[in-house]
Amino acid sequence: MREVVSMVVRGRWAWISLGLACWAIAASIAACYLWYTSEVYRGLYERALGQLEALTVAVDILIDYGNGTKVWFNGTRVSAGFTVFDATCLVADVDYIPYSGPEWVGYPNNTAYLVTAINGVCNNETHAWFWWFWDASAHAWVFAPYGANHVNATVVDGGIYAWTFRSFTTWPPPPP
């Protein structure tokens, strides 16, 4: 009788061991599959990111509210061909007035935009919004000589742009 009990106990442990071995093999196969799948998706992600970077540019945008509050939007990805106006509309709530006419050469559809408010801060009798770009070679802010949606205001990769809410009683307004 003792031999029968011993064989039954040994048989039970054999089945338990066999079950654990099967579980370990199945878990290893599942882990390998998940690793392989994650590598496939990582490759797809990196390829998509490369394609995205080829179609976009990264810019830094400063919004200076004129009261000491300055907000930076660094590394903002925008479509290649966007203007400063387009890029600003991605990071802020912008109100503007369109001016159309044949004299507005260089503007999309011959329409220039006058920015009247950014994030609820509106132009008034003494203050308005002005935009600037950073000239890295001169290490200085440059007051833009054309509107923010002009073809010459197309953003470049690594470009730094600023909007300032300043008084226009002194001209030109002080840089950011």
Image (cartoon, rainbow, N blue to C red):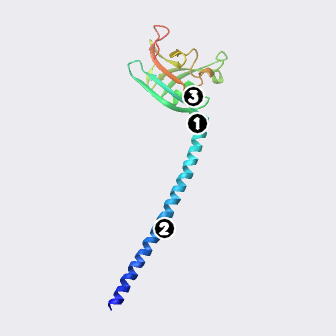
For the residue pair 104 and 166, the one nearer the viewer reads as 166
The kind of secondary structure element at disc 2 is: helix
The residue singled out by tag 1 in the image is 53
Find the distance from the CA under tag 2 to the CA under tag 1: 42 Å
Find the distance from the CA under tag 3 to the CA under tag 1: 10 Å
The kind of secondary structure element at disc 1 is: helix
For the residue pair 43 and 11, the one nearer the viewer reads as 11
Contact between labelled residues 1 and 3, with CB atoms less than 8 Å apart? no
Q: Where, quadrant-wise, is the C terminus in this rendering?
A: top left
Residue 140, given in percent of the width and then of the height, sits at: 50, 15
In this view, which residue lies farthest toward the top? 170
First reached walking from the N terminus: tag 2 or tag 1: 2
Amino acid of disc 3: Asp
Residue drawn at 49 percent across, 67 percent down: 26
First reached walking from the N terminus: tag 2 or tag 3: 2
Amino acid of disc 1: Glu
Residue 40, given in percent of the width and then of the height, sits at: 57, 52
Amino acid of disc 2: Ile
Residue drawn at 46 percent across, 18 percent down: 164
Residue 64, given in percent of the width and then of the height, sits at: 44, 21
Residue 167, given in percent of the width and then of the height, sits at: 44, 12
Q: Where, quadrant-wise, is the N terminus in this rendering?
A: bottom left
The mark found on residue 157 in the picture is: 3
Rendered position, 31 above or below 53:
below
The residue singled out by tag 2 in the image is 25
